Image (cartoon, rainbow, N blue to C red):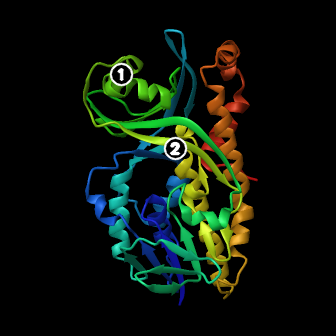
């Protein structure tokens, strides 16, 4: 039986373990933080496109799950002086535009699925060393060799160093993503994105009485207003939604934001995966969508190899995956970076941006292309 090692217990590692699970493949999932999923530390919410939702529904067998909040529409706004202008709306007639879920709830569900899988072994160990030449990992003075090792350990792990060798497209945005959960008594069914002078702010409903807020601000703004952030954000939300029925706001969490696009994906049979391949700005909500497309492609490639009776270790699997996924991952990451720059509060750019946004609805093809890319990605 061929063996795959997945290191990392985030959404990427858990999802990949279930989807890549096959009858003649054994998967060892090394999960260092598995006991923390009963806590309330990860309150973040994530959005997936319609096509990716259909993919995970099928592969994870979540048809009867109420984890996902369907949105048929997303409204985009920009700040024009004291006015908030709705410059673009994406809407689907016969299907949903996106689905939103709370990270911790999906993780709990994935762990339950994994514990029932015979071919997936959950190992609560931290892996500190990987031998790329041998395809081996080390822990507790033990050495285990695998046909494929997948690293799902965030965007900035030292285990990537020997693979990428400094070959990455990187940028420190000097920004922080502020996230929190708000309870309310209003009817907020669909998502909204506000491009404010402080930075983009997204509202993502995942329950009829709760939504997640993701607000990107500069490190300077964060430092200057750290003590009053909750008050500032609450007042901001009330103004943006013209809504005074907010009940409760959870603790605000902050996460540093980087652009990190790998130009080298693997070495021998060790593959970087998830955020390790493409850490992108959160303003477009494409991070986990890119991950799911990566998983889908890797799953298709492994299935093809198994049908041909080939060994994963000696195949061209990772090279094929690299050439198939690198173009979209890097192009979309750079497009998101450019979009973020476009909405920056730059003095000499404000008037030009205002003209473009007020007339963007006249260009239907832009809307169609944007909607297609958000759903299915870029076909390269």
Give the residue displayed 31% in from the left and 50% down from the top: 41
Up-down relation of residue 277 to residue 145 (above or below): above
Q: Horizontal and vertical percent for residue 265?
A: 67, 64
Return the residue found at the far bottom: 1
Per the image, the residue denoted by label 1 is 232
Give the residue displayed 35% in from the left and 73% down from the top: 124
Query: In the image, which disc is placed on residue 95?
Result: 2
- The reply to whether residue 297 is visible in this rendering is no
Q: How many marks?
A: 2
Give the camera-side residue of 175 and 75: 175
Q: Horizontal and vertical percent for residue 131?
A: 59, 78
Q: Horizontal and vertical percent for residue 118?
A: 39, 82
Return the residue found at the far top: 82
Query: In the image, which disc is placed on residue 258?
Result: none
Give the residue displayed 73% in from the left and 54% down from the top: 327
Decide which of tag 1 and tag 2 comes sooner along the chain.
2
Distance between mark 1 and mark 2 Cα atoms: 36 Å
Say if mark 1 contacts mark 2, CB within 8 Å.
no
């Amino acid at each position: 039986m061929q063996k795959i090692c997945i290191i990392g217990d985030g959404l990427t590692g858990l999802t990949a373990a279930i989807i890549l699970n096959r009858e003649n493949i054994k998967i060892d999932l090394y999960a260092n933080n598995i006991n923390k999923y009963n806590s309330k530390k990860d309150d973040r919410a994530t959005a997936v496109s319609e096509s990716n939702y259909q993919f995970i529904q099928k592969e994870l067998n979540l048809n009867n799950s109420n984890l996902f909040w369907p949105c048929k529409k997303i409204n985009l706004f920009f700040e024009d002086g004291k006015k908030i202008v709705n410059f673009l709306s994406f809407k689907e007639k016969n299907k949903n535009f996106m689905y939103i879920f709370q990270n911790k709830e999906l993780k709990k569900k994935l762990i339950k699925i994994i514990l029932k899988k015979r071919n997936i072994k959950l190992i609560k160990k931290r892996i500190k060393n990987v031998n790329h030449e041998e395809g081996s990992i080390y822990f507790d003075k033990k050495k285990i060799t695998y046909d494929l090792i997948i690293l799902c350990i965030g965007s900035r792990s030292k285990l990537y160093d020997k693979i990428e060798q400094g070959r990455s497209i990187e940028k420190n945005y000097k920004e922080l993503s502020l996230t929190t959960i708000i309870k309310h008594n209003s009817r907020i069914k669909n998502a909204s994105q506000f491009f404010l002078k402080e930075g983009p702010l997204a509202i993502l409903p995942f329950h009829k009485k709760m939504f997640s807020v993701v607000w990107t601000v500069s490190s300077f703004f964060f430092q200057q207003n750290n003590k009053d952030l909750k008050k500032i954000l609450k007042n901001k939300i009330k103004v943006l939604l013209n809504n005074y029925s907010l009940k409760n706001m959870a603790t605000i969490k902050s996460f540093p934001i980087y652009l990190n696009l790998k130009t080298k994906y693997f070495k021998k049979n060790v593959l970087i995966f998830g955020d390790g391949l493409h850490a992108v700005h959160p303003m477009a909500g494409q991070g986990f969508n890119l991950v799911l497309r990566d998983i889908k492609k890797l799953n298709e490639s492994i299935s093809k190899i198994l049908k041909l009776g080939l060994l994963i270790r000696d195949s061209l699997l990772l090279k094929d995956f690299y050439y198939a996924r690198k173009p979209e991952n890097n192009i979309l990451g750079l497009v998101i970076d450019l979009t973020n720059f476009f909405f920056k509060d730059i003095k000499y750019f404000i008037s030009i941006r205002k003209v473009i946004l007020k007339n963007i609805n006249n260009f239907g093809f832009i809307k169609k292309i944007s909607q297609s890319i958000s759903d299915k990605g870029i076909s390269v």
